Image (cartoon, rainbow, N blue to C red):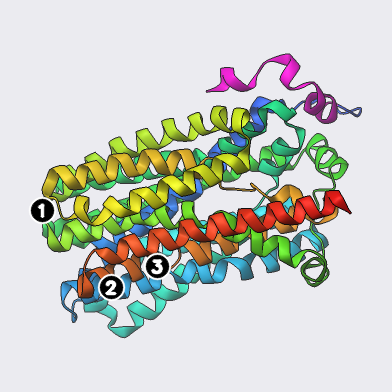
Amino acid sequence: MMSGISPTNAHTEISETLHQGDDHSHITPSEIAVGVVIGRASEYFDFFVYGIASVLVFPAVFFPFENRLDGVLLAFTIFSFAFIARPLGTLISMSVQRRFGREAKLTMALFLLGISTAGIAFLPGYASLGTASIVLLSILRVGQGLALGGSWDGLPSLLALNAPPNRRGWYAMLGQLGAPLGFFLASALFAYLYSSLSTEDFLDWGWRYTFYVAFAINVVALFARLRLVSTNEYDRALESKELQPTNVLEMTRSQGYNIVIGAFAALASYALFHLITVFPLSWISLFSTQSISEFLVVQMVGALLGAIGTVASGVIADRMGRRNTLGSLAVLIAVFSGFAPTLLDGGKLGQDVFILVGFLILGLSYGQAAGAVTANFEKQYRYTGAALTNDLAWLIGAAFAPLVALGLSSSFGLGYVSVYLLSGALCTLAALYVNRAILERGEND
C-alpha cells in the first residue's frame, strides 16, 4: 500500500510544508498516512467490537428478561446512542482545542474512548446489577460516542489538501481503509473466542477479552497519533491550510447547506455499511441455521474484499472523479438493494454471496464517501465542517440501520432492507445533483 503514496513527485508540496522551520525532526507524508490508517483502524475496531457484541453477547448478558429478538433490538437501541452523542462530542472537543490545543483534545478523546471501552469490559451483567447494568452500559456507550466526536485530528484533510490533483481519490481512501481492517480484526477475535469456548464461558468472561484488546489498541493509537500532533511541523502544516476549529454557530450560518449536502452525499455508503456488517449477523443468529463462527469467517473474507475495493476506489476516483465515482456506486447500491431480500433468504449460499458482493461494493463506495464534497467549504471552515459532516452522515445513515432493518424485516419481511438501501442511494444521488447545481450556478455567477 505504501508504495502507492511515496513517489517524490506526488509529495513535493506536502513535504515542503511539513519540513519548513528550524526543528530538525521530520514528518513524512508516509508517516501521516500511517497515522490516518492507525487512528481510523483503532476506532473502527472498537466500533465493531461493540456492534458484534450487541448481537452475540448483550441480549443474554444485559437483557435476559426479553426474548432473543427483543433483546437484540434493545441492544441495537443502545448501539445508536454513540452516533447521537458524536456530534455533541465534536462540538465540545472543538471548544477544548481552541482553548487548550489539539494535543489536549485528542488525549482527552482517546482516553475517554479507552475508559468507556474498558468500563464495558468490567461491567457486571443484569444478573448482578439489574437495571443499573443497562443504565451503565448506556452511559459508557454515550462516552464512546463523545470520544469519537473528539478524535478528529485533521490528518485526512491535511492529506487531501496536499494531494496532487490527479491523486485525490487515492489519498481520500487511506483513512477509509480503517473500516475493513477494524472489522476483520474484530470478527477474527470474536470468531476465535466463540468457537473455542463453551457458550457459558463465552457469555461469562470470554467476550470481555475483545474489549480489553480494544482498550490496548486505543492506547497504541493514542501514542502513534500524539507523536504527530505534538510536533511543530504538524501544527505549521495545519495552520498553513487553515485547518483549525472555528465557531460552530458562525460556520452553520455561513456553510450550513454544505453540511447537509455532505451528510446526504455519503448516505448510500453509510446505509450499506451496517446492513453488510452488523445487521446480517443478527439475522443469521436469529433466523438461520448457519454456524455463527463460519459466518464470521465469511464476513472476514468480505472485509478483505472491502479493503481491496477501498484501494481500487482510489484508482477509479482519480480517473472518473470522486463525485462521479460516488454517484455511480450509489446507482450500483440501488441495483444491489433489489437482490438483497432474495440473497438473505437464499440459505447459506445466498447469504454468503450477499456478504461478499456487498462488501466489495461497500469498499468501492465507502472509499470515497468521506469528504467527497467538503471542498465546498471555505478554507477557514473546512476543519470543523468536515468533522460535523462526517458525524451527521453516520447519524442519518448508519446509527439506526441495524435497529430499523431488523425490526422491520422481522415483522414485515426482508423487502424493507431493499427499501432502506434504495432510500440511501436516492438521497446520495439527490445530494450530488444539488451540489452540482450549486457549483454550476457559482461558476456562472
Q: Is residue 33 above or below residue 146?
A: above
Magenta span covers which residues? Answer: 1-19
Q: Amino acid at mark 1?
A: Ser
Q: Amino acid at mark 3?
A: Phe
| Badge 2 element | helix
Task: Say which residue label 1 marks.
Answer: 198
Percent coordinates x, y for residue 256 in the rendering: 74, 67
Percent coordinates x, y for residue 272 in the rendering: 40, 53
| Badge 3 element | helix
Q: Are marks 2 and 1 in contact (CB under 8 Å)?
A: no
Q: Residues within 10 Å of mark 2 (few under 14, many from 20)?
A: some
- What residue lies at 50% left-to-right and 45% top-to-bottom? 366
Is residue 234 found inside the magenta-colored segment of the image? Answer: no
| Residue nearest the viewer, comparing 208 with 153 | 153
Task: Say which residue label 3 marks.
Answer: 79
- What residue lies at 34% left-to-right and 48% top-to-bottom? 336
| Residue extending farthest left | 289
Is residue 9 found inside the magenta-colored segment of the image? Answer: yes
Percent coordinates x, y for residue 342 in the rendering: 20, 53
Of pointers 1 and 3, the one earlier in the residue sequence: 3
Q: CA distance from mark 2 to mark 1?
A: 29 Å
Point out which mark residue 407 bears.
Answer: 2
Dot in front, 1 or 3: 3
| Residue nearest the viewer, comparing 201 with 12 | 12
Of pointers 3 and 2, the one earlier in the residue sequence: 3
| Residue extending farthest top | 8
| Badge 1 element | loop
- Residue 170 visible in the snapshot: no
Count of numbered circles in the view:
3
